[in-house]
Amino acid sequence: MSQSIAVWPFINAAYGVTVAFLAAAGWLALARYRRAAARLAQAERL
Amino acid sequence: MKESVLPARRPARPGGWFHYLANPGRFQKLARPALPWLAAASLGFTVAGLAWGYWFAPADWQQGDAARIMYAHVPAAWVAMAGYAALALCSFVSLVWRHPLADIAAEEIGPVGAGFTGICLVSGALWGRPMWGAYWVWDARLTSVLILFFLYLGHITLIRAFDNKAHAYRAAAILALAGAVNLPVIVFSVQWWNTLHQGNSVSLAGSRIYPTMLYPLLVSALGFYLTFVTLVVARMSAAIAERKTAALLRAAAERAP
């Protein structure tokens, strides 16, 4: 007789990790892009 | 010295478009207006694909709801491999033509590709535990993807390990090209060896997945590909701006009395 395992915690963890990575990567890239653009604009005024 | 003057508007010889576009300044002119559209499309397709797979796609007849992990795991795996192929291509261009844009692209692809490979490994482990009874097995597919992850980490480390950037780019490009041999091993591992990991369900020849599960998978994959492109383009654009800022500050410091 097979023993069933609750799969939803694994599904939720897989989706959670994926969404957290995508959100973090997007936020970091956007923050770096905006910081670099702001610093370049500042340097061009020198 | 007329022959050394570059054309102002368009390339002079056939195939020159490649070299014409591989210029950081021209890249910035194309990337800046494209980035908001790329970001919006990435967000839309990724959210649609993942939500479709999580809530609306049918459960698999054999694996049940656990198959929903596929909508995150498979696109991450595809992007991880495509990202490494792009890294190898940039490395080839860097070694052959010494295009600075190829070096910048290679440097920025590395962390993004490693992230997607990490997601592929983690989601795969979370899928393996309920289906196989183990988070990890030393199966040919899993092991070759783990090697891909280490290749990405090696590239990230190597490209930042030298004081001389030109040496760093060359060493990292050689590693990336040598590591490209792992890509066909990943793809064909499920055919060459008797693996616990299932065979390829989707290929260029067709699909063995029912449309109600295939469509959310393809939407999710498109979202992941677009996200990868958006992240790399944004990071490249930031890297070019950082270099220009550093050059301007150096010039200002030299001008100062």
Image (cartoon, helix red, strand yellow):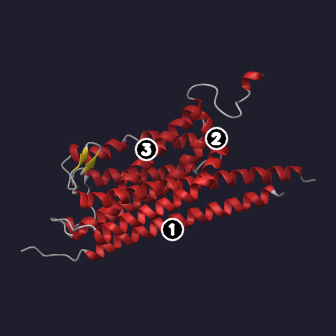
Check the image and name the residue furthest to the right. Answer: B257
| Cα–Cα gap, marks 2 and 1 | 29 Å
Q: Secondary structure at mark 3?
A: helix
Q: Quadrant of residue B100?
A: top right
Circle 3 chain? B
Please identify the quadrant where the N terminus of chain B is shown.
top right
**Residue under label 2:** B23
Q: Name the residue rendered at 57%, 62% in the picture.
A: A29
| Cα–Cα gap, marks 3 and 2 | 21 Å
Give whichever of B63, A3 is nearer the camera.
B63
Circle 1 chain? A
At which x and y percent is residue A16?
Answer: 39, 72
At label 2, the amino acid type is: Asn
From the viewer's perspective, is the residue at label 2 or at label 1 nearer? 2
Q: Secondary structure at mark 1?
A: helix
At label 3, the amino acid type is: Ala
Q: Name the residue rendered at 53%, 53% in the picture.
A: B232
- How packed mark 1 is, by other alpha carbons closer than 10 Å (few <14, some 14-19, many 20 or more), is few
Q: Is residue B141 left or right of residue B251?
A: left
Circle 2 chain? B
**Residue under label 1:** A24
* Visible residue check, residue B83: yes
Q: Which mark is residue B85?
A: 3
Q: Name the residue rendered at 88%, 50% in the picture.
A: B255
At which x and y percent is residue B244?
Answer: 72, 50
At which x and y percent is residue A10?
Answer: 29, 72
Give whichever of B110, A30 is nearer the camera.
A30
| Cα–Cα gap, marks 3 and 1 | 24 Å
